[in-house]
Image: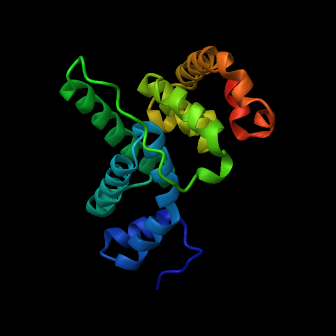
Amino acid sequence: MVNEQDSDEVLVQRAGRGDKRAAQMLVERHTDKIYAVCFKMLGSQHAAEDATQETFLRLWRSANKWKPAGAKFSTWLYRVAMNLCLDQLRKTKRDAPEEAAPEQIDHAPRPDDTYLAGEKRLIIDEALSALPPRQRLALTLCHFQELTNIEAAQVMEISVDALESLLARGRRTLRDRLTPLREELTGKMSDEPTANISG
């Protein structure tokens, strides 16, 4: 019998044996976080929903093969979502004509709307979406998903030093882009979670 207190690892093993309730509990437990990462990476509600759905389809198809090999289940799940997003970004870049206008960010409501409000969120999202994908992912995992540097490095399958380099470059680029907009972002930005990005 599936219990709400069961660990992810127990649930994925049960899902691998065909337990649909265990799989459903994993979906309920992780959907908001996976969607938030996908949205930050892809900038579109529709694309983020597709990537989130595909992440959980892959979970269902692979659950019987999953083995705890040092990494937590959530790390593996983030990695699946990250790879789907990076594949989509590469495909979009490859398929887009060079003269095409940049894709507009979809500002529809999403699960993580509560931590930043209104114009500040829009300005920061636009600056974030302009970063190279790996810098954007590093910042998303560490600052928005609150993973530790070690956890984020595991998700990205890179060293902690490489992650810290991506974070430093991403923060520097964001600071350079956001500094001219400082007046629009003044007020309570220092109280917002994103204030750490420039640190």
Q: Residue furthest bottom?
A: 1
Residue 195 falls in image quadrant: top right
**Where does the image place residue 32, in percent across and percent down from the top left?**
51, 58
Residue 39 located left or right of residue 95: right
Between 166 and 155, the one nearer to me in the picture:
166
Report the number of discs. 0
Between 54 and 78, the one nearer to me in the picture:
54
**Where does the image place residue 58, in percent across and percent down from the top left?**
29, 56
Residue at horizontal 51 percent and vertical 54 percent from the top: 110
Residue 191 seen by the camera: yes
Q: Residue 3, relative to residue 171: is it above or below?
A: below
Residue 146 seen by the camera: no
Q: Residue 45, relative to residue 158: is it above or below?
A: below
**Where does the image place residue 172, in percent across and percent down from the top left?**
62, 15
Q: Residue 196, relative to residue 25: is it above or below?
A: above
Residue 22 located left or right of residue 188: left
**Where does the image place residue 125, in percent across and percent down from the top left?**
54, 35
Q: Quadrant of the C terminus?
A: top right
Residue at horizontal 32 percent and vertical 42 percent from the top: 84
How does the figure colour the protein chain or chains? rainbow
Residue 121 falls in image quadrant: top right
Residue 138 located left or right of residue 172: left
Residue at horizontal 61 percent and vertical 18 percent from the top: 168
Residue at horizontal 40 percent and vertical 49 percent from the top: 45
Between 127 and 155, the one nearer to me in the picture:
127
Q: Residue 188, relative to residue 199: is it above or below?
A: below
